[in-house]
Image (cartoon, rainbow, N blue to C red):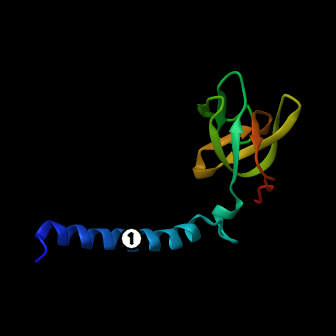
Amino acid sequence: MMKRHSIRRSITAALLTAGVALGTATGAQALTPAHHGFWHHRVEGRVVSPEPVTVHYGPGVNRWATGTINNGMHVWIVCKARGGQVGSNDRWYKLAGGQGWIPAYYVNNYRYVRWCTR
């Protein structure tokens, strides 16, 4: 006769094994970017600036400041647009989640960033 805690351990182990197998199958699918919609178009980037980069409400230095992002921080970029010149670049990146815009001059992006459509 099995002890009660041994039965619980066996059931827990079986459930965890099934959950891990199921989680691996569905987890891999969930991490794959969709071929449509918002997540497919996001591009990861890294801020490269000796000073914190100001996040603006729109693409330009004359827009309201909404915050800052420090050097080395990862950002998710939705699209790019032309705006005020910063350094030698007039392109601005729109950040995911409605966080605002930052100058492309201060971002190393890891893939192509599409143009914003209006």
The residue shown at (74%, 31%) is 61
Would residue 86 appear left or right of 66 to someone viewing this image?
right
Position of residue 106 measured from the top left corner of the image (x, y, whole percent): 76, 33
Foreground of the two, 1 or 10: 1
Q: Residue furthest right?
A: 88
Which amino acid is tagged 1? Thr
57 w.r.t. 42: above or below: above
Report the number of discs: 1
Mark 1 Cα within 10 Å, few/some/many (few <14, many 20+)? few
Foreground of the two, 115 or 58: 115
The residue shown at (32%, 72%) is 15
56 w.r.t. 3: above or below: above
Say which quadrant the C terminus sits in.
bottom right
Would residue 18 appear left or right of 35 to someone viewing this image?
left
Residue 70, quarter of the rendered image: top right
Residue 8, quarter of the rendered image: bottom left
Say which quadrant the N terminus sits in.
bottom left
Foreground of the two, 80 or 71: 71
Position of residue 99 measured from the top left corner of the image (x, y, whole percent): 59, 44
Q: Which residue is mark 1?
A: 17
